[in-house]
Image: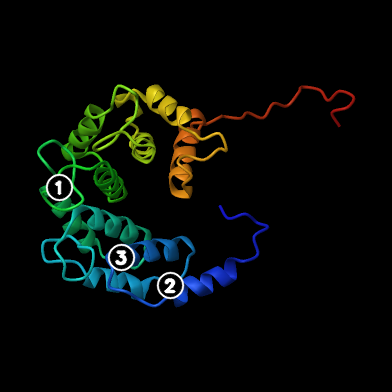
């Protein structure tokens, strides 16, 4: 939720609405998702994104480029946020992702490329948003992610990194699969690598991912049931 004391939202909305259009799918998807969150008109940019979809159901980095799992995942999530999205476009995109899963269970940044954490997490989030989190391909992807946890508790497609470890923790929480990894070791990996001034790697992006993953793990959503109790007879001080 936006801080109620923030007064710059109208100006921010005006700016983001007026940003020049682009055929870059990453740009289109992220702008569409933001416009939807801000409850602004998404019809034009939604159409632009759908028009950039390839015949195989996927999206590439830009219109006309070869489809890849990462950009396809971004497009699915953005279209699901929009009230003007096309169900057939999303369905075709999901089919593309399922057909282009690697044998090890992950997805590459490009089709057929080696499995990467950022691409696999993006696809898992997209499949969940599309209502396809129950397919066997999701279980295979979770198994792959679990299998690459390092002895130091972290995750990395090549060597362990803070941002990839945070991505995996958050994805496992999102998919109710946190028990499939050694989650405490993963969170310890993050805490042990926080810099003395409070950041991770001096990066705003990495710090935001690590802080969010740590908070979500340590403070899970709890549901508390409240009951109203009324005494049989009001006593002094209860009136």
The image's colouring method is: rainbow
Dot 1 crowding, Cα within 10 Å, few <14, some 14–19, many 20+: some
Judge whether 235 appears above or below 156 on screen: above
Q: To which quarter of the image does residue 43 belong?
A: bottom left
- Please name the residue shown 61% across and 30% down the image: 226
Judge whether 187 appears above or below 56 on screen: above
Judge whether 100 appears above or below 179 on screen: below
Tell which circle, 2 or 3, labels the residue nearer the N-terminal end: 2
Residue 3, percent from left and from top: 62, 54
Which image quadrant: the C terminus? top right
Residue 129, percent from left and from top: 31, 49
Residue 186, percent from left and from top: 38, 27
- Please name the residue shown 28% across and 50% down the image: 126
Judge whether 146 appears above or below 50 on screen: above
Q: Name the residue under label 3.
A: 85
**Pick the front one: 36 or 72:** 72
Q: Is residue 144 left or right of residue 17?
A: left
What is the number of callouts on the image?
A: 3
Tell which circle, 1 or 3, labels the residue nearer the N-terminal end: 3
Q: Is residue 226 left or right of residue 128?
A: right
Tell which circle, 2 or 1, labels the residue nearer the N-terminal end: 2
Dot 2 crowding, Cα within 10 Å, few <14, some 14–19, many 20+: some
Dot 3 crowding, Cα within 10 Å, few <14, some 14–19, many 20+: some
Instruction: Calculate the distance from the C-alpha at mark 2 to the C-alpha at mark 3.
Output: 12 Å
Q: Where residue 98 is drawn, which disc sits there? A: 1
Q: Mark 2 points at which residue?
A: 41
Q: Is residue 2 left or right of residue 158?
A: right
Q: What element carries label 2?
A: loop
């Amino acid at each position: 939720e936006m801080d109620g004391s923030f007064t710059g939202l109208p100006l921010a909305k005006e700016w983001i609405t007026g940003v020049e259009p682009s055929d870059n799918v990453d740009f289109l998807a992220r702008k569409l998702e933001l416009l939807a969150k801000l409850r602004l008109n998404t019809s034009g940019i939604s159409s632009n994104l759908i028009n950039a979809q390839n015949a195989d159901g996927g999206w590439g980095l830009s219109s006309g480029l070869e489809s890849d799992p990462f950009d396809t995942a971004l497009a699915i999530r953005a279209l699901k946020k929009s009230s003007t999205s096309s169900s057939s476009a999303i369905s075709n995109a999901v089919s593309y992702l399922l057909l282009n899963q690697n044998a090890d269970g992950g997805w590459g940044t490009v089709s057929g490329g080696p499995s990467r954490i950022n691409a696999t997490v993006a696809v898992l989030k997209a499949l969940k948003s599309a209502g396809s989190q129950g397919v066997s391909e999701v279980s295979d992807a979770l198994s792959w992610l679990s299998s690459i946890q390092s002895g130091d508790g972290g995750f990395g497609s090549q060597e362990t990194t803070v941002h990839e470890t945070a991505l995996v923790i958050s994805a496992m929480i999102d998919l109710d699969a946190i028990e499939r990894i050694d989650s405490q070791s993963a969170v310890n990996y993050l805490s042990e690598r926080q810099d003395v001034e409070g950041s991770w790697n001096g990066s705003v992006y990495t710090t935001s991912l690590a802080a969010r993953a740590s908070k979500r793990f340590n403070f899970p959503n709890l549901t508390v049931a409240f009951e109203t109790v009324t005494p049989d007879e009001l006593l002094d001080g209860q009136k």
